[in-house]
Amino acid sequence: MVTSVAPDAQQLTTKGRATRDRIVRAAADLMFRHGAAGTSTPAVRDAAGVSSSQIYHYFADKDALTRAVIAHQTETILANQTALLGRLDSFEALKAWRDVVVQAERDLGYVGGCPLGSLSSEVSDHIPDARQALADGFTQWSGAIRGGLQHMIDRGVLRADADPERLSLAMLAALQGGLLLAQAQRSTAALEAGLDTIVESIRCYATEDVTDDPQ
Amino acid sequence: MVTSVAPDAQQLTTKGRATRDRIVRAAADLMFRHGAAGTSTPAVRDAAGVSSSQIYHYFADKDALTRAVIAHQTETILANQTALLGRLDSFEALKAWRDVVVQAERDLGYVGGCPLGSLSSEVSDHIPDARQALADGFTQWSGAIRGGLQHMIDRGVLRADADPERLSLAMLAALQGGLLLAQAQRSTAALEAGLDTIVESIRCYATEDVTDDPQ
DNA sequence: AGCAGATTGGATTAGGTAATCCAATCTGCT
DNA sequence: AGCAGATTGGATTACCTAATCCAATCTGCT
């Protein structure tokens, strides 16, 4: 709505952009660990090593900062998901991706769940415009998965009657729910069960000649 | 640890129990809509129609109130899940349960997600003892699903090589993730995709004679 | 050099929140 | 009736948080 006064629209020096990024990164880290509501602007100020005025120089208010964190986490996740694992266009890639997700949650000590999922659950109903940004992030995420599945169909690894749209949504749902449960249960059992069951479903659509070892 | 001073341990009159319940119900409603951090004790006081001292008479602090809300939501959900739908011990029951879950989220206007899941994501890392309570709630929940699947195996509807433990965890993960995504996307697409894909996986273990219409 | 605008520091304020306290009232029980 | 303990009302406090303000400094550009 209001774009003329919003600090986001102003000129940013190289130095200014660096400071802004430092604030966003510090806020993202704190919000991942303590939630959005559990992260105070003084805490962000100290963690980023800036003064109060700098936060409000680059962001209209705390909600705007939270939106910036959402955008940052979306970028980070999508970059990791696509760069690290390439396109999820084979059973080997799906299995490798599954292992990375599970191992990442273990390495974190079952703390924090999904950076985007936790934020989403906390703020999507309360911060204006945040819900749409989160929805877009999830859509891109499932889209990346869907692209891989579609590629598998195109290459004849999966039958044409497989529904990549439904399967990719199911995969993301299992991932998000699995991470949420991992946080509470301090175990990746539900995460593994969810991801493996979706992969198993996808395997049902494999063309007959592809029968790699089930593990 | 400290049980001698905790207000929970004291004698409760009929009237006292009613007041305590009123506080918990009001807090549960507010926390469902605005989150735990987004719910202030003054707001609970007003919604419950009590005075400040009453809240702290029945609960040691806000964390204790939050724990009571978790216990309350766990009870409510498990009662609904088992009483309303009985044991999930047939494909018809699974389908009916799926429809109820999806319709419930639609009726709520995609607001709030799962009362237990949202709370879990927000507080399981921050409130002492809350994580364990949430984990127990989820374990009971998946246990109820597992019981139904086991019953299907016992009756010969599912083959013996189906793994009820894994499938029930997968189902709960898909449910939680689906509700989280529904909140952001304002759509039950991911929820339906997740639940349907797990049900489809379960169907793969059906004994041959059972082939009801796929929908 | 010198200007305009970006950036920074840090004090300050207004408002809300968790939690406490004490006195008053009610309740169950004998 | 009358007591002990449970319950209630509501003022109060100490603290924290979001946000503002103004003056000082830096930066890119001509």
Image (cartoon, coloured by chain):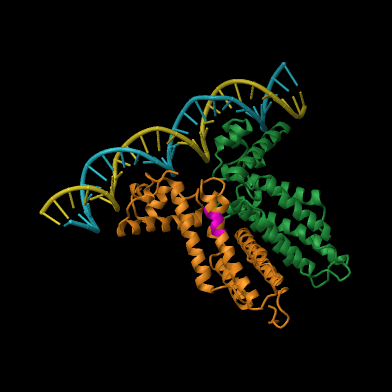
Chain colours: A green, B orange, C cyan, D yellow
The majority secondary structure of the magenta stretch comes to helix
- Residue A68 x %, y %: 65, 44
Q: Is residue B13 left or right of residue A203?
A: left
Horizontal and vertical percent for residue B177? Answer: 64, 59
Query: Residue at 57% across / 45% down in the picture?
Result: A36
Can the viewer see residue A1 in this picture? yes
Q: Is A204 rendered above or below residue A135?
A: below
Q: Quadrant where the N terminus of chain B lies?
A: top left
Residue A177 placement: quadrant: bottom right
> Any magenta on residue A102?
no
Residue that sits furthest to the bottom in the current view: B209
Picture quadrant of residue B143: bottom right
Relative depth, front residue between A134 and D14: D14
| Residue nearest the observer in this picture, A89 or A60 | A89
> Which residue corresponds to the image point at 65% horizontal and 58% vertical from the top-left?
A190
Q: Give the residues in magenta.
A: B133-138
Q: Look at 71% across and 61% down and name the residue there.
A: A171
